[in-house]
Image (cartoon, helix red, strand yellow):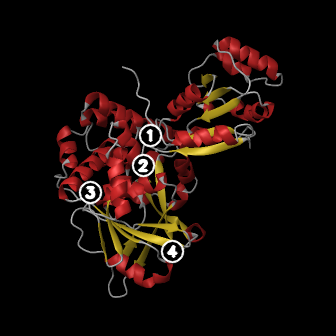
Amino acid sequence: MEKHVFKRKIYDEILNWKENISDKYALLIKGARRVGKSTIAEEFAKKEFRSYILIDFAHTSKAIKELFDDTYDLDYFFLQLQQLTGTRLYEKESVIIFDEVQLLPKARQAIKYLVADGRYKYIETGSLISIRKNTKDILIPSEEHKISMYPMDFEEFLWAIGDRITAETIKTLIARKKPAGNVMHRTLMRVFRLYMLVGGMPQAIETYLENNNLQAVDVTKREIIDLYEEDFTKLDSSGLAGDIYDAIPANLSNNASRYVLSSAREGTRSLQVRDLLPDMLSSYTVNIAFHANNPTVGMALSKDAGRYKLFTSDVGLFITLAFKDKNYTENVIYNKLLSDKLEANLGYVYENAVAQMLVAKGNNLFYYTMESETSNHIHEIDFLISTGDKICPMEVKSGRYRGHKSLDVFCEKFSGRIRDKYVVHTKDYKWEQGINYIPVYMIPFI
């Protein structure tokens, strides 16, 4: 069966590179494995260039790899490359794609000279776990323009399943600040829950479209998770990185005010993950929210680097991790999740989904905690985002929210710093006493 090529928003970013800076920079597409980097690069090359050569360093000939041993004579280099690939290159009209570039560091190092030569354009893709580990002995080119690719967001998911109505409906409701009404709201929540269950990994969405079976989708997601965990062993042969990843759902479900390392492996201390965590973040498999010690614009300046929460980069993979108590998750579980009838507190699932959507919109993640003045209770704001010179606090709820004491206390304490207040929940939209109560499916569009 022919592979689906999904519409992706990153296409416009790649087009901007081509039209404005491709004469000075190669493009490096960063992102997790299986997120669609190679597919979008080749699709772009087909549509926007007269010809292209794709070199997959995970599956190419020894002769092509050996070309990069000596790039001093570029005339001869390009002559051999065209001969070996059977593809003609046209000056200013062709692009060369270095796929899985981390597997041949010499190729990445050659980018500096290839870009300076100016005849052709260059796009690189690769797994950043391996890129970080394979660059210690090479000169990393400054002639790289880097962009990040994330799992498909809710709107891209809707495009993929052929839904051209839902996103426009939600945008209209937001613009008018109107509730959807009972029937429409239930429909929109069901579509959003489907997105959470399938997730934004193109391979999982492809499986859903081909099989219309969520258990089959779960198998695909487990294969992706297994791939990630194999990659994690490249960071740390002890398997600690994989344990940290696996324990993300448990950490969030326990409502801890930070990631508790001992829940991943008993006795683990922060010093053990000091160097490991940046590599995990570079793999784009996890998102991180740092505690903001001073919740105001410029939160990165006051973040607590030792106090953080971790989320999976894709909510569909999160669901599979959360129910990984046997070799597969049965359709009955997925059907109950889809119909919102599973007897479990799924607030942590929605929190992971919100984190993913905020990151996709270009936000760094921060949260805030403070002790109650009248009890031992800890008040927590799940997410803080900045808009202009103000901040917007968000509390994420699931099911029947019964209050937002933390939001109230926070807003009273920092009233002069706040622009918009949000309670993100599973109910319909309303505006009340200065608070926007927004259904979770609106987050990508606010």
The residue wearing badge 3 is: 346
Q: If you read the primary sequence from the N terminus, does the residue marked by circle 2 or circle 1 appear first?
A: 1
> The residue under label 2 is which amino acid type?
Tyr
Label 2 Cα crowd, 10 Å radius (few <14 / some 14-19 / many 20+): many
Q: CA distance from mark 3 to mark 4?
A: 27 Å
Viewer-side label of 1, 4: 4
Q: Quadrant of residue 343?
A: bottom left
Label at residue 190: none
Q: Are marks 2 and 1 in contact (CB under 8 Å)?
A: yes
Viewer-side label of 3, 1: 3
Q: Quadrant of residue 134?
A: top right
The residue wearing badge 1 is: 229
Relative image position of residue 379 (x, y in whole percent)? 37, 76
Q: CA distance from mark 3 to mark 1?
A: 25 Å
Q: If you read the primary sequence from the N terminus, does the residue marked by circle 3 or circle 2 appear first?
A: 2
Describe the element under mark 3 as helix, strand or loop.
Answer: loop
Q: Are marks 4 and 2 in contact (CB under 8 Å)?
A: no
Q: If you read the primary sequence from the N terminus, does the residue marked by circle 3 or circle 4 appear first?
A: 4
